[in-house]
Amino acid sequence: MMRQVNLQQRTYPIRHPLWLLAGFWFCVLIALAVVFRRLSSLANPSTAGPPRMVAADATFASHALLTEMHIIPAAIFVLLAVVVLLRSNGNAWLERAFFLLGAITGITAYAMSSYAIGGWIERSAVLVFNTWFLVSLGRAYWMHLHQNATKQREWTTRAMGILLGIATTRPVMGVFFATSGRTHLQPDQFFGIAFWIGFSINAFVIELWLHSRRRAAMQRLPV
């Protein structure tokens, strides 16, 4: 996939490596699957299944309205991100909806942390990464207002990379669940750790990618 970016009045192609696109789509699909699964469990609560999963579902069911106010805008935001990030030509109303839903997702994430299964470790991860997400989204919107498309895309990419960290936490949680027989760790003990690991992976990868892209662009500048 190729994009065109304007750098000091010159246009250069940007190639998205296969590993980055694969990671992006992997996180998008997991994030949407998590939302659909959560909505299904809220609509049809069940007491069957592994006790740890049933307990987690009960925690979310105890504040179902807040959960829906968070995950539904988040799902739409992720879908809009696919359009906003992977299309070369922006659409004004789609971008406005993208920023609005992103703000709603971030604000409700703070409220959701009040019911964090992983306690203060999970809350601390939400505080750090959700704040960085909102800052990045705010910077992207600021660049949008000032018609700086290059910087807007950079900050938008950063914001999405951070948000999709919630998808990366799922395989990490899966590892903790699978090894709980040996570690004897309970969800309230490893959820926070999984949050820190998942979001840190995404934050690191996206910064590495943005840095490599800036370095490649600088190498193309005329001497």
Image (spheres, grey):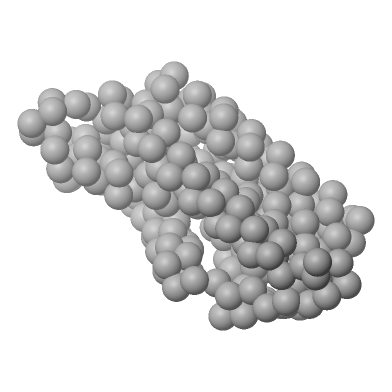
Residue sitting at the far top: 120
Q: Position of residue 203 (x, y in %)?
A: 52, 44
Q: Position of residue 144 (x, y in %)?
A: 84, 58
Report the residue at 86% width, 67% height from top. 8
Report the residue at 77% width, 56% height from top. 151
Report the residue at 62% width, 80% height from top. 2
Q: Quadrant of residue 130?
A: top right
Front residue of this view, candidates 20 and 137? 20
Location of residue 140 with respect to 195 vertically, above or below: below
Front residue of this view, candidates 168 and 104? 168
Location of residue 219 with respect to 172 vertically, above or below: below
Is residue 121 visible in this depiction of the protein?
Answer: yes
Residue sitting at the far left: 182
Q: Position of residue 199 (x, y in %)?
A: 46, 41
Is residue 90 visible in this depiction of the protein?
Answer: no
Front residue of this view, candidates 94 and 71? 94
Report the residue at 80% width, 52% height from top. 141
Q: Quadrant of residue 75?
A: bottom right
Q: Which image quarter holds the C terminus?
A: bottom right
> Is residue 148 left or right of 68 when viewed as pictured?
right
Residue sitting at the far right: 146
> Is residue 194 left or right of 97 when viewed as pictured?
left
Q: Position of residue 183 (x, y in %)?
A: 13, 28
Q: Quadrant of residue 182?
A: top left
Front residue of this view, candidates 80 and 198? 198
Q: Which image quarter holds the N terminus?
A: bottom right
